[in-house]
Structure formats: structure tokens, C-alpha cells
């Protein structure tokens, strides 16, 4: 089955091939179509089946015909013809780090270079010396790119939750053990993409050599692939590649923006800069030879007439137009979270386990924590926490931190054993595409939270749309976050576009380096969630003693303006 990502990649490659052939306007048309296809929140084939391809931004009649051909045959004759017109080595050339189709075309047209090997020979023979745009630093970058290509193909992308502990350890080591002033991770990691190909780390330092020495000495570093004056590339013990760059303070903001990406976002920024008679790159924003911005990201965007754009939104999905109007929304942040509605204890947990969860919640300055006290297993059997454990939860209720009790069930009637157990709200756990409604808002079966909706349950766009629709009907939130049982960032965006609130799991009780909270926050931010769209960024309020017969507002699940940690409310943005 063809995925939206596969189709988008084909049309993006068509754009690159057109750039290689010197086309002026067609490449951007195909790139816009590729961006729109990639950002669709439903299957491309489903849109085609409804004969609505032309409703996709950037898709006109000609591109719609090519999409239909691709969906029907798995290939596009126009794409195949373009590939025959271009030397195969040029495609390899434009895929080298730091290169692109326009630079590859210059090598082809101006120097007769048609592939990486010929470029290597041209550099060795000094043929790039004196060529406009290829100074000593640029030529050294090309050498590094060619060496990286020889070292082997790019490794497979990894789930961001796997990379988080690694990135944290490296950043901590650079901040504590190196002569680094500022340290930031850029790239798709900073944009909170679900997967990460490699890590880009930027630092400022007066002594790059000491930074590289401290970095290389880290036990996670297995091999140094390349070291220059300001950049070092290493492989970690698990095979992950890390590029460490030392930049000047006056360049740091520009470098952070540039290496954060995305590629499509940066292409749009460069186009805006050209329209203003400016040039923007990793060293700053320039008017002629004068750098007019670069120390901070904010001044880079401001120089282009834009408000600062959160990294998670930088995918060229309309964020630049919004920033031009100065209307960039405030996204949810870690300080906005006021509790967690979905905390599990082991079925045989004792009172000490409750105390550990409560202590963790206090450490996070939470106002409340919702603990699942009973539920229905996948096989239909009912379980409850031990009486003493539930009693301990009740004892803690009057204390500063509010402790709420939840039950977690499948779709359908509430089991009698749970109906007689006091609880504050219900969590629904789907096991397949729902065959019945989870209940209209305010009913006895209405949940506050729909949990465990992820790739383990949602097998296609139709199933996801159904669960999102059911959550909206019940005015319930859906969880986002890492793992197969929560919505990823793309599915989270579909939920937000449908007006469904999200819940950000916080990993209460987990190990200190557990990345759940930060990854889930990143996914919520990529989905465009403001604080008032995150159910646990709002107050718990007064909840029903039975979880039935109350609206979500009565149950206290509506999200008011988030508070600061001092207890004062922040104004809504």
C-alpha cells in the first residue's frame, strides 16, 4: 500500500530533477504539492477515491493526474522520463550533505561534473578554486560531505523517545565538562518529529578544540568520522551519527534556525529574504556584506518581517503566513501542565506505591493526579486495586495535592463491580474500531479520556477518524505521546483539527530520565495545541463522585487559562 510519505517523496524528487534541468517555476509547484500530501491527515488514496485531489493545496489538474497514475501503477511516467534525462551520478551528488539540486546543476553545467567521484577529482585538481561561491570553507565542506558518503549510507531513523536519553546525556556532558557557553540540539529532534535520523548539536565556545576533546571522550562516542576547525562528526556506540558544530555567538541564532530546519521551511525563508534584498544562511542575515541579524532566532525572523515561530511548527504548513501576520499561537509548555489524569499502579500496589506517585507529583508542582483504581482487562475480567491502596488514595484527598480516582474500561456498559466502586471519571480503552458509540456527553458511559488509541489499535485513517469523532461526541480528550498506544504527532494534529482536546502523559513514577513527558509535549506542540487544548493543563475542578450524569465541564475537565507555578493565571493567548 502506498503511503502519503512515499508519494510526497516522489513528487519532491520530481522537483529536484526539474531543478537539475534548470526549470524555473515547476520545481516549487511540485514541492508545494509534496508538502501538502505529506501533511494530509488522511490517506491520499481516500481523497482520490472521493475525486477530491484538487482540493489539496497546490494540486492542480496536471499533478492530480500524476497522483492518480502513481496510486494506480506505483510509478509516474513523467518521473521516469526525467530520470532518463539526467546522469545518475547527479542524483547522488545532490543528496550529499550540504548540497542540493541547484549546486549539483552548477557542477554539471559549469564544470562537467556528473557525480561524486568526478567532484572529488575536480576538488583534488583545484578546479573549484576561484569559482564564484566556492571559497576555501565551502570546498572543505564539500570534502567532508564526500568523505561522509564514502563512509556509508545514512542509518535508519529512530523513534525520538529512543534518542532523548542519548541527547540529554551528550548535552549535559557538554554543558558540564566542556568550555561551552551555549549548547542546543537542532534538527528534527528539536522539531519533535516522531523519528530522528541523526543529531545536530550546536555550541558556542572560545576553544573549539577543548569542546571536541571533551565530546570525543564521552563513553557513548565510538568513532570520530571527521573533525575540522568548527565541526566534528562522530558515531555513537548504538550507530547514531552526531554532528557537533562550534559557532560564534553572533551566528548562534542563525545557525540554530538553519540547522533546525525543516528544509521546506528554510527554502521559504530564503525566498522571503531574496524578496527583501537580503540573504539568509547559517551565519546570519545579510544585506550585501553587512550582517544585520544572527545572534538570536528572534532577530533572524524579525529581519524577515516575521514573528518567531516555534520549532515544532517549522514544516511550511502555513506557519510562515501566520507569523507574517504576527499571530503565532502560544503552544503548550511544560510549565503549563497541572497534573496527570492517567496514572497506573501495579494491580497489587500497596500504600507505599501511592506515596511514591504523590511525591513525584509534588516534585513536578502538580495540582492533581488521577490514578486508575480499577478497570476491565482485555479478556473481560474486572480488576481493582487492593482495598488498603484505595483507602490510602482517599486519605490523601484533603492534602494539598488533589488525588482523583479513575476507572478504565472498554467500550460498552459499565461492569457492576465497578459501578459500586467510587470513582471520579472514566477512561475508555478501545481494542478495535468501535462498533458502538462511547456515549454522548453527559451520559453515564461518557468518558473524560480516550486512552491507548495508537498504532496498536488504529490501523488506518478511517479507524482514527472514527475514534476522533467518538471522542469529540463525548467531549473527551485523547492521549498523545510516544509508543504504539498513543497518538503520534500527525494523528494528534488530526484530533486537534477536529476540535478534540489532548492529554499529555507525564510519566509519573517512572525513572528520572524517562522521556514520556517531553516527547508527548513535543507531539502536542507539533499538533498546534495551545494550553487550553490540553486537558491536563487546565484545572481538575469539582468532579462527580460517581463519574456519571455530569457534563465534562461539571466533571472539571474543561481547560481554563493555565497558571504559572506561582499560582497566578496567565492570560489566554
Image: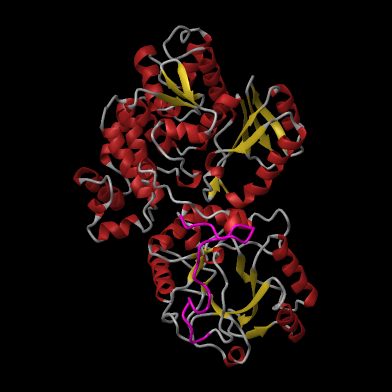
Residue 515 at what x, y percent from top left?
64, 54
| Quadrant position of the N terminus in the picture | bottom left
| Residue 98 appears anywhere in the view | yes
Residue 405 at what x, y percent from top left?
63, 79
Residue 187 at what x, y percent from top left?
54, 39
Vertical order, 194 against 554 (above or below): above
Q: Which residue is painted at 67% across and 75% down in the image?
A: 403
Q: Quadrant of residue 325?
A: top left
| Residue 80 appears anywhere in the view | no
Q: Which residue is painted at 51% across and 27% down in the image?
A: 294
Residue 105 at what x, y percent from top left?
36, 21
Q: Of residues 148 and 530, which is closer to you in this image? A: 530
Magenta stretch: give its range.
548-573
Q: Is residue 565 magenta?
A: yes
Q: Is residue 261 magenta?
A: no
Going by the image, does 363 lie left or right of 565? right
Q: Of residues 421 and 461, which is closer to you in this image? A: 421
Task: State the predominant SS element of the stretch in magenta.
Answer: loop
Going by the image, does 312 lie left or right of 24? right
Vertical order, 22 against 428 (above or below): above
Residue that protrudes farthest toward the front in the picture: 568
Q: Which residue is painted at 44% across and 21% down in the image?
A: 286
Q: Quadrant of residue 45?
A: bottom left
Amino acid at each position: 500500500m502506498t503511503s502519503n510519505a512515499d508519494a510526497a517523496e516522489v513528487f519532491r524528487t520530481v522537483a529536484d530533477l526539474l531543478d537539475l534541468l534548470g526549470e524555473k517555476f515547476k520545481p516549487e509547484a511540485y514541492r508545494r504539492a509534496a508538502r501538502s500530501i505529506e501533511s494530509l491527515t488522511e490517506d491520499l488514496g481516500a481523497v482520490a477515491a472521493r475525486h477530491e485531489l484538487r482540493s489539496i493545496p497546490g494540486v492542480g489538474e496536471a499533478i492530480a493526474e500524476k497522483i492518480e497514475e502513481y496510486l494506480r501503477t506505483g510509478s509516474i511516467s513523467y518521473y521516469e522520463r526525467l530520470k532518463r534525462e539526467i546522469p545518475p551520478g547527479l542524483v547522488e551528488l545532490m543528496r550529499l550533505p550540504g548540497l542540493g539540486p541547484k549546486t549539483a546543476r552548477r557542477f554539471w553545467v559549469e564544470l562537467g561534473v556528473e557525480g561524486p567521484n568526478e567532484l572529488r577529482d575536480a576538488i583534488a585538481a583545484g578546479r573549484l578554486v576561484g569559482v564564484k561561491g566556492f571559497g576555501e570553507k565551502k570546498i572543505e565542506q564539500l570534502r567532508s560531505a564526500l568523505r561522509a558518503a564514502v563512509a556509508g549510507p545514512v542509518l535508519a531513523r529512530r523513534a525520538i523517545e529512543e534518542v532523548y536519553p542519548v541527547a540529554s546525556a551528550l548535552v549535559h556532558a557538554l554543558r558540564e565538562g566542556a568550555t561551552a557557553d551555549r549548547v542546543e540540539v537542532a534538527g528534527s529532534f528539536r522539531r519533535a518529529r516522531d523519528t530522528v535520523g541523526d543529531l545536530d548539536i550546536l555550541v558556542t565556545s572560545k576553544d573549539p578544540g577543548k569542546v571536541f576533546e571533551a565530546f570525543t571522550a564521552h563513553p557513548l562516542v565510538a568513532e570520530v568520522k571527521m573533525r575540522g576547525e568548527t565541526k566534528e562528526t562522530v558515531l555513537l556506540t548504538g550507530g547514531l551519527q552526531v554532528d557537533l558544530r562550534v559557532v560564534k555567538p553572533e551566528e548562534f541564532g542563525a545557525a540554530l534556525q538553519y540547522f533546525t530546519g525543516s528544509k521546506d521551511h528554510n527554502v521559504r525563508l530564503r525566498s522571503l529574504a531574496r524578496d527583501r534584498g537580503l540573504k539568509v544562511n547559517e551565519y546570519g542575515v545579510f544585506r550585501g556584506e553587512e550582517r544585520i541579524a544572527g545572534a538570536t532566532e528572534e532577530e533572524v525572523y524579525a529581519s524577515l518581517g516575521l514573528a518567531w515561530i516555534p520549532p515544532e511548527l517549522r514544516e511550511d504548513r502555513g506557519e510562515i503566513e501566520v507569523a507574517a501576520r504576527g499571530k503565532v499561537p502560544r503552544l503548550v509548555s511544560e510549565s503549563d501542565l497541572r497534573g496527570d489524569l492517567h496514572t497506573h499502579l501495579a494491580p497489587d500496589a500497596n500504600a507505599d506505591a501511592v506515596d511514591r506517585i504523590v511525591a513525584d507529583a509534588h516534585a513536578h508542582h502538580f495540582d492533581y493526579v488521577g490514578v486508575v483504581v480499577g478497570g476491565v482487562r482485555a479478556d473481560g475480567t474486572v480488576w481493582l486495586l487492593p482495598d488498603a491502596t484505595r483507602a490510602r488514595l482517599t486519605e490523601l484527598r484533603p492534602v494539598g495535592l488533589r488525588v482523583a480516582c479513575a476507572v478504565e474500561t472498554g467500550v460498552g456498559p459499565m461492569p457492576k463491580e465497578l459501578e459500586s466502586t467510587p470513582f471520579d471519571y472514566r477512561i475508555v480503552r478501545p481494542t478495535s474500531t468501535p462498533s458502538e458509540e462511547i456515549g454522548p456527553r453527559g451520559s453515564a458511559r461518557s468518558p473524560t479520556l480516550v486512552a491507548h488509541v495508537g498504532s496498536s489499535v488504529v490501523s488506518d485513517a478511517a479507524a482514527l477518524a472514527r475514534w476522533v469523532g467518538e471522542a469529540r461526541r463525548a467531549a473527551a480528550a485523547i492521549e498523545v505521546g510516544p509508543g504504539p498506544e498513543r497518538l503520534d504527532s500527525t494523528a494528534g494534529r488530526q484530533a486537534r483539527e477536529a476540535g478534540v482536546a489532548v492529554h499529555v502523559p507525564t510519566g509519573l513514577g517512572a525513572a528520572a530520565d524517562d522521556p514520556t513527558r517531553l516527547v508527548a509535549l513535543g507531539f502536542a506542540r507539533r499538533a498546534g495545541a495551545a494550553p487550553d487544548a490540553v486537558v491536563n493543563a487546565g484545572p481538575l475542578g469539582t468532579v462527580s463522585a460517581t463519574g456519571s450524569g455530569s457534563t465534562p465541564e461539571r466533571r472539571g475537565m474543561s481547560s481554563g487559562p493555565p497558571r504559572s507555578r506561582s499560582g497566578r493565571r496567565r492570560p489566554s493567548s
